[in-house]
Structure formats: C-alpha cells, structure tokens
Amino acid sequence: MPLKGDLVTGTLDLLVLKALQLGEAHGWGIMERIRATSGDQLQVNQGSLYPSLYRLKRQGLIVNHWGVSENNRRARYYTLTAKGRERLGAERQEWERLSGAVNRVLATRSV
Amino acid sequence: MSLLSRFREFLDARREHDAVAEEMQFHIQREIQHNVDAGMSPADARRKAMRDFGGVERFRESARDERTGARLAELRASWLDWKLGWRMLLRYPGVSIIGGMTLAAAMALGAGFFEFTWEMRDPRLPLEEGERIVRLENFDVAASQVERLSVHDFLIWRDQLESIEQLGAYRPIERNLITADGRSEPVEVAEISPVAFPLTRVPPLLGRPLVEADAAPGADNVVVIGYELWQSRFNTDSSVIGRTVQLSRVPATVVGVMPEQFLFPINHQIWTPLRLAGTLPRTGLPIRMFGRLREGVSLEAAQAELASIGARMTSANPATHEHLRPRVLAYAAPTEPLSLMVMTNLSIWVVLLIAGTNVATLMFARTALRESEIVVRNALGASRLRVMGQLFVESLVLSLVAAAVGVALAMGFLQYARANFASDVDWPFWWDISLSLPTVIYTGLIAVGTAAIVGLLPAIRATGPRVQTALRSIGGGGTQMQIGRVWSALIIFQVALSVLGLPIAIAMTGEQLAQLRMRAAFDAEPYLTFRPELDPDEVPGDDPDLPARMMTLVGELERRLEAEPEVVAVTFADALPAVDYPPAQIEVERGTEPPVIVDTDLENDQVLITAVDPGFFEAFGSPVTAGRSFNSGDVGSAHAVVIINESLAQNIGGHPVGTRLRTVSDGGEQEPAPWLEVVGVVRDLGLEPTAQGESDLMFTPASVATLPAPPHVVVRVRGEAAAFEQKLRETAAEVSPDLRLYDVMTLDEVIWLDDFGGILMTASIVIPVLLVLLLSAAALFALMSVAVARRTREIGIRLAVGASPRALLAALFKRAALQIGLGVVAGNLLVLALMSVIVEEASVVPTALPMLAASLIMVIVGIGACFIPARRALNVPPTEALNGAR
C-alpha cells in the first residue's frame, strides 16, 4: 500500500485516540501521556495536538467537558466516544498492517 | 439563515473563542509548572514554555481552522488578518505609500467619474412628483436641432393637448439688476409663464408667486426673486415686497421671494412674466416649453398625442412644418447616452488595472520577503485558501485606505467644481454631485476588485505547490519566489514610459516656470478689465444697430471714466493681454524678391495678432521704440497699417518700419490677405513668453464698431484696481441701464486664471510621469529585493569564502541593469518614433539633451532603487548565512 501524504497527521490522530482510551485527559495531559508511554521517543508539538483534538471532535470521535485539573485549575477534558473507540480499532489494525508491511520490506535480506 | 440562528452562531463562536483561550492558558501554565518541577527557575520555566508554544494568537488561528470545517470558512477573514494587514502597511511604508498613492489616484478618477455619470444617468427633479414634469420640443430633423421659435405651435399645443397640463414656456434673458443703492449687476432672468409656480408646487417664502394676471398685456411689471439674490442684494430684508427695482431699462415691483431650493427652470434667481402674442410659425421669441403629465397618463401616451397634433399642423403648414417633429421628454432627461457613460467608466477600469498590476509587483516583493512566514503557516495546518485569504485581506486593507483617500480626493474636486460652477445658470438645479451612497458602494467594490488583483496574484504564486520545496529550504535562508516574465516586461515598459514622459514633463515645467517668472515681472495691479454687453432690442434675432449703439455707449463710458480722478487711462482690445490671441503665419516683402515667411519663436512660425484701440500702448505704458503709434485716422483706413513688438521686429530683421507684411492663409490656397505696412515697433509687454523670450505680436488698429464682438475694456487706475469696481459699475449704470458689465476682474486675476490653467495642464502631465517614474523605481526595488532575498545564503557563503563584494554586486545588478537598459533604449526609440510622427522635420539635436537627461535620471533612479537591497545583501554576516537564520 502506498504511503499517504497525511501519514503524520493520521498517526497523530491515532496516538491521541489511544491516549484517550486510557482515560479522559486534558490537552497537556494527552501530550504528556504520549511522551511517557513512548518512552520519551515521541514529542507531540502543541501546534499539532490542538488542531488534531478539534478535528477529532468535529468528526464526533471525542467529546469534551470542563473539569478541575490535578493542580486545581479549570481545564477542558476530552473523552473517547463509542464512535471514537470503533475508529481507534480500525486505525490500529490499519497501522499494524502498514507497519508490518514496512517491517517485512526492511527485513528482506539482500541477495 | 435566519437572523436569530446567525446571532446564535456568533455567540457560539465567541464562546468557543474564549474557551480556546482558556485552554491555551491552562496548557502554558501546566507546562510552566512542569518545567519548574524539573528544576528550572520560574522565569526560565515561563520563557521555555512560551517559546515551545510559539505564540498564542498564531496557534489559536490554526486551531480555529480545524474547528470550522467548511472550506469556505477558510476564506473568512479574521480580525487578526485585518490587524496584520494594518501592521503590514506600517512595516513596509515604501510599498504602502507608493502603492497607496497609485491606487488612490486611480480610484479618485474612478469615484469622480462614477459620481458624475451616476447623477447624469437618471437625474431626478427634486420637486413633488418631479418625474411627471416634462419638457416639450419642436425638433427640426433637417437641421438636426431644436427649433426654439415655437410660440405659434406652443399656443396651439396649450389649447389642444389633453395629456399634458400646466403647459408653460420660458425665455432666458440677461438684464442688469439695478437696486435702490445704485448697484448694477447683470443677472440671468427667466421670463416665464406664471403656471411654472403651481407646476413645481413650491410656495413662495414671502409675498406671492407670479400669476396669470401679471402676464396680461398692459399689466404692471412685477418680479419674483430667489433666495440667494434676496440675501446678496437685499440683505434678507423682509420688507423687500413692494419695493421697485430696475431690470435694465424696465422698472418692476418685487412681489415675492422664493425659497432656497426653488431654482426652476434651470438655475434661476429672478423671474418675470412671459408675455406671448400670437405669431406666424417659426417666428417670434425663442422659447423653451414645459408641462406636467396629467394624472395616469404615460410619457408615451403624451408623445403619441403630441405627434398626432404635430401631423395635423404639418398638413396645415407644410412649408414651415415639414421637418418639425414635436416631442415630449422627461424634464431632466440625461444629456449623454448611457452607453457613453458606461464606456467612460470602463476606460477608467483599464487605468485601475494598470495601477493594480503595478502595485501587485510591489506586493509580490513584499510577499517574497515574507515567504518563510507563509510556509510556516502552511505547515502549521493553514490551508492554501486560508493563507491566500490572509494575503487578500492585507491587500484589501491597502486598497480600502487608498479608496478612502481616492473618494476624499474626488469629492474635494467635485466640491471645488460645485463651489465654482454650480451657481452658473448652465448648471441645472437637479445636478447633485455631492458624495452619494452608490459611489461609496461602487468604490468599495472597486477596492475589493483591486485587492483581488493586487493581493491574489502574488498570493497564488506564493502559496503554489512549491511551498513544499520552500519548506525544505526554509532553514537555508532563501526564498524560492521569482519575478516572472510578465512583470519583467512591465518593468521595462514602465522604464520606457518614464524615459518618454520625462523630457515632455521637464520641458513643460520649464516653460511654465519661465512664464510665471516673466509674468510676475509685469505690474498688472493698476488694471481693471471688463467686457460690456448691451440688451438687444425686443425684436429677436440680429440687432443691426447694436455695434453702433455699443460704440456710442462704450465711448461715453470711456469719456466719463477718464474724467474720474483715479483713472489714468481707458483702452480696449479684441482680447486681453496674456489670453487667447489668435495666431497666424505672416510673410514679409523684401524688395523685388518673392515674399518670405517670417521665422518666429512660436510653433509653426506663427505670430499672435490682436486688434487694439489706438491708445492701447500708452495705457499699458509700452513705449514706441521705432516709428510711430496708431492714431485715430488709422482705424478703417484704406492704407492698412500695423505695429509690431520688438520680438517680431528682431525676427524680421533690419529696420522693419516701412516694410510690408501680410498674413498667410493655411496651405496658401486662398487669396492672400492685403498688405499691411509696419508703422511702428513697441516694447514687449512680457506677458506672452516663449522659450526664446516674448512671443511675436502684431497689432492692428480698431474701434469698438469695427470689432466683431464686444471689446475687452481695460481701465488703468492709480492704486488698486479692485477698489474701483463699484465706481465702474455705477458709472456704467449712469451711461445706460442696459449696459451690462461682465467679467469685471483685475488684470492680475486674468493673468492668474490663465496661469492656473497652464499649471493644471502641466500638472496633468507631470504628475502621471512622476508616478510612473516612482513606480518603475519601486518595481526595480522590488525586483532587486526578491533577487537578494533568494540568494542571501549564497551571497553570505561566497563572501565568507572570500569573493569580492564588487563581483557579487555586479552579479546582483545584472538583471536590474538589463531591464533599466532595455527600458531606456525602448523609451528613446519611442521618443524618436513619436517625434518623427508629430514633427515633420525631426531633428535630433534639440531633443538630444532632454533625452539624455531623462535617460540619466532613469538610470540614477533605477540604480538607487537597487542600492538598498544590495547593501542589505552585502551586510549579511557569513555566520548567519551559514546558519540559515535571517
């Protein structure tokens, strides 16, 4: 399967959905969750995170509500919807298929 | 979408905007705390958080792009775009001033023409049911003009026409209004059918309007005056009713004052009853007719009825009526066909298009310098449409500012025109050329269209598919944008146009300045000038006694004026010095050889000819330097004599007194004019300068009766001429109540009016030339800026490895120099081509210097324009260039 131009955007959406599967979180929390769970390998840019959040919200994959944060401030929390959960499953399969294919290519021994 | 839901959406957007702001604030706070927890000082923690975040506003923008899904919404301008557009105006003042001036000039033209044509297109009478007021005309199809001698027909129409009521007529005449205080000034009187007053439905302010009884034969003479006249001549005195005034020779009682807005039929301030007696067809007084369409009758129905009456009259009077076609028109019918007005406005669009394309070049350069910003925005998720929207709004800010300035300029000019001409009797009262809403809307639309040209062209190029390439090179410090072929051609064309226009502008300015300087040396202060006219006898048409009466009255006036102690001299001529002398070629007799045309300083070897009173030279203190002055015996003598000025004497050469000369008709096909003997030479007055000095002038002797038109009389007084006006008018009224004095002005004013016309003429050439020159310079500046911006990194590296700055400069200048060079060559070729078309004997010598000067100016301006960006390039620190930071 050919690589799509919006691979990076699509991947970020997948990471955000996955981060929210672990529980509701605010923007900064999602960023931190991705950083921590990737072992500091993935640093999500704020400039990409929020556009991604609003995009997912518009698509009905996540919803938000206002709550109180761990440091006692008002924060906007995001939660995965049923539709978002469904999409996460599909995106995840797609990702595994794609990364598996890439891995197979890379594992090919030279002749 | 209903208003309510739109309002709700607005509220939602507002709420969401606040929510995002709060969310961002939270994010930054959380990040700061995180940094502090990691061991940073609060100040450092904050700084790092802010840097990582990279500007709340910018971020909020791209976030919003994601929230509003609709593609169209991407084009929606945000408040930030407007703010940014305004900031851009201030940040690039060169682009703003030059581009703004160019657009403002073009838009002033557009707004002014539109306001005027909009008003002319469908003029409305500002009267109650004014659209039902009509004018009636007897159109002569053979002569292709309106037959005004229509009293005979008017009386029949008034009896027979069913579809038009309140049918009336008027005749514009000029009379002296002489008031009790002795003031006598000419006024435009409307001799009008009393029915005009009920027709317009405007009640008088004081007293009564004219009534039918006033128009009856033998009725007392009465007059109704307008508001302005009441103010200026009667000091707004309400006891004016019943007072007697004199209209030239006729005394009349003031019976009413009309309110300010009543100016019917055209722009009148004084009305007397029109008395009409039955006459034969096409004889009698010249009249204009008006009426009101009867309730429920259309213009077409009225026209049909009038045509059928016309047809009956034609069969009754075939000899006089064969070619007459009576017609009914809306009273304020447009004077020009609509198509012509549309064409005029379209031609201004072409000017706007050229101006817009030019400014687009500048905007392109501005955009090129900001390419990295555009690329970053694009990478942050702003779509191409979104970025184009932003660039469009930036241009819109510029073009709206230009439109505001343009409208203000146009309105200033129209105000000036109104202040100076609107009280003229030829300026119809229904022409209102103050700023109208349609003009504001039109100019606003033009501004949007201009912004599209100015902003979108560069935006399309700046946001094209290459943005991805640019993204990769952005760190390298260089733009990918280039000035394309079309713009290069435009620059060359403008350079050529500047080179073409500059010599003309330089020459015109030089001539104008020389004329102003020369005329300033002439002491015009003691001269008061005027033009006398006489009321014709009541018999219309030519008055054969008029010249003789004029001669007697002007002679009497002259005698009485000369008796005044403050008057030095009174004289007259067919034209005033400094204004409108007719030119002609003359040839001079030399012994037995065939006559030769005198080589003079004016174009086509012409001399200016004027007919003057024998006392003219003495009155102007212009001494006779050879031969003699005119005497009364010279006027109308069989032995025709002339006096010439020193300039002409020099060009004739030798001793000109006694030589014979005559005017040459065009092409020499007609019979040559009779020979005239030069009897004297007078000193140059210094009012008709040419590049070589005073124009060549030839004077012929004249009396008031021998002149084809009323003379221009000049009174020389001791002290200030303007102060003598009142005395002059009183004396004229004493000589005869119907001797009307027009254009009473000091010679200073006459000369200034002529100079002012010349200055306007010169400015109309010089300003566009300067603007084109400025635009060429700005375009070259833009070109060079883009070239430098593209190669900043390369220049820095080359300088770092030891390249000579001179070689680098040469490389940078190459393209700009090529365009300047091509433009200068093309401009000079154009000058030569035009010269060979306009001037028959094209000689390069007299134009070589201005051409050289123009080329030099262009080269200096062009190189100067390139200098600043070039210096910027050479100052790039090599380390910065290598780092890619700019």
Image (cartoon, coloured by chain):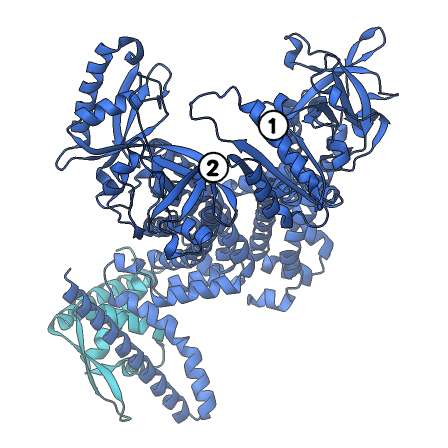
Q: Closer to the camera, B562 or B38?
A: B562
Q: Is residue B523 above or below residue B554?
A: below
To which quarter of the image does residue A9 belong?
bottom left
Q: Closer to the camera, B591 or B222?
A: B222
x and y percent of residue B460 in the render?
40, 50
Query: What's the chain of the residue with tag 2?
Result: B
Q: Which residue is mark 1?
A: B552
x and y percent of residue B509 in the render?
67, 42
Residue at the spot x=57%, y=34% of the render?
Answer: B532
Q: Colour of chain B?
A: blue
Q: Is residue B615 left or right of residue B199?
A: right
Residue at the spot x=46%, y=40% of the render?
Answer: B187
Any part of residue B724 in sight: yes
Instruction: Indicate the amino acid at tag 1.
Output: Thr
x and y percent of residue B750 in the render?
63, 41
> Which label belongs to residue B248?
2
x and y percent of residue B761 in the render?
59, 39
Q: Is residue B790 left or right of residue B18?
A: right
Residue at the spot x=84%, y=20% of the render?
Answer: B656
Residue at the spot x=37%, y=25% of the render?
Answer: B286
Quadrant that contains the C terminus of chain B: bottom right
Query: What's the chain of the residue with tag 1?
Result: B
Dot 1 surroundings within 10 Å: few (below 14), some, or many (20 or more)? some
Q: Disc 1 on helix, strand or loop?
A: helix
Q: Is residue B590 left or right of residue B14?
A: right
